[in-house]
Image (cartoon, helix red, strand yellow):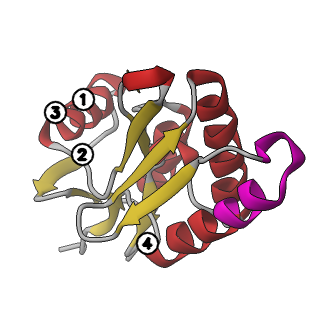
């Protein structure tokens, strides 16, 4: 009897790299000319997995978010895994936004991935949802590699990571 090959599909971000990117963004905001005399801040909450952005107005908030996205992408953090909340405009025009970090595949997205794999019609491929990741097994490694190529071509709103290929 042939042994099945498998791989895991997951998603997440390196929290230390996010922390480094937030610190770099804060330094750039403090030294950039167009932010002189403003009180724009970035706060990273490691336990909650969120970044809180506070700026003088919506325009500056978008500029701060641009700096943050640039620093995150340079440090290898997938920007697709940012879940940007709604912009809240407070008193005197101050704007706030909370950015959550996706640290696992939620059940709804896992079901979408499972359905798209089944609809593609791979032979003898099995998908198991295991908490916040998926395990995909098949008797053929070639089928698994075709599945990985298929998943890389799809957009599920997050950066998928493939590991544990055996």
Of the two numbered discs 1 and 2 in the rendering, the one whose residue sits closer to the viewer:
1
Nearer to me, 141 or 35 = 35
Find residue 66 and report its horizontal and vertical position in percent: 69, 39
Is 43 situated left or right of 149 in this image? left
Q: Earlier in the sequence, mark 2 or mark 4?
A: 4
- Disc 1 target residue: 112
Kindly identify the residue that appears in the image at 22 percent across and 28 percent down: 115
- Disc 4 target residue: 15
Q: Earlier in the sequence, mark 2 or mark 3?
A: 3
- Disc 2 target residue: 124
Q: Write down the region rendered in magenta.
A: 25-36
Q: Earlier in the sequence, mark 1 or mark 2?
A: 1
The kind of secondary structure element at disc 2 is loop
For the residues labelled 2 and 3, the Cα–Cα distance comes to: 23 Å
The N terminus: image quadrant: bottom left
- Disc 3 target residue: 108
Q: Tell whether label 4 touches label 2 (CB within 8 Å).
A: no
Q: Tell whether label 2 touches label 1 (CB within 8 Å).
A: no
The kind of secondary structure element at disc 4 is helix
Kindly identify the residue that appears in the image at 64 percent across and 46 percent down: 69
Of the two numbered discs 3 and 1 in the rendering, the one whose residue sits closer to the viewer:
3
Answer yes or no: is residue 89 visible: no
Is 3 situated left or right of 166 in this image? left
């Amino acid at each position: 009897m042939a042994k099945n090959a498998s791989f895991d599909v997951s998603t997440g971000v390196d929290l230390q790299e996010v922390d480094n990117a937030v610190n770099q963004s804060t330094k750039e905001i403090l030294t950039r000319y167009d932010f002189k005399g403003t009180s724009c801040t970035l706060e990273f909450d490691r336990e909650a997995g969120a970044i809180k952005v506070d700026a003088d107005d919506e325009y500056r908030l978008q500029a701060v978010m641009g700096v943050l996205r640039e620093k995150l992408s340079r440090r290898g953090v997938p920007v697709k895994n940012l879940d940007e909340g709604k912009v809240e405009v407070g008193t005197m025009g101050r704007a706030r936004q909370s950015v959550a970090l996706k640290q696992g595949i939620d059940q709804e997205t896992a079901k979408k991935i499972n359905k798209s794999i089944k609809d593609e019609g791979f032979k003898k491929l099995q998908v198991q949802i295991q908490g916040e990741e998926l395990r995909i097994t098949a008797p053929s490694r070639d089928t698994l590699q075709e599945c990985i190529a298929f998943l890389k071509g799809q957009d599920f709103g997050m950066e998928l990571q493939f590991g544990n290929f055996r």
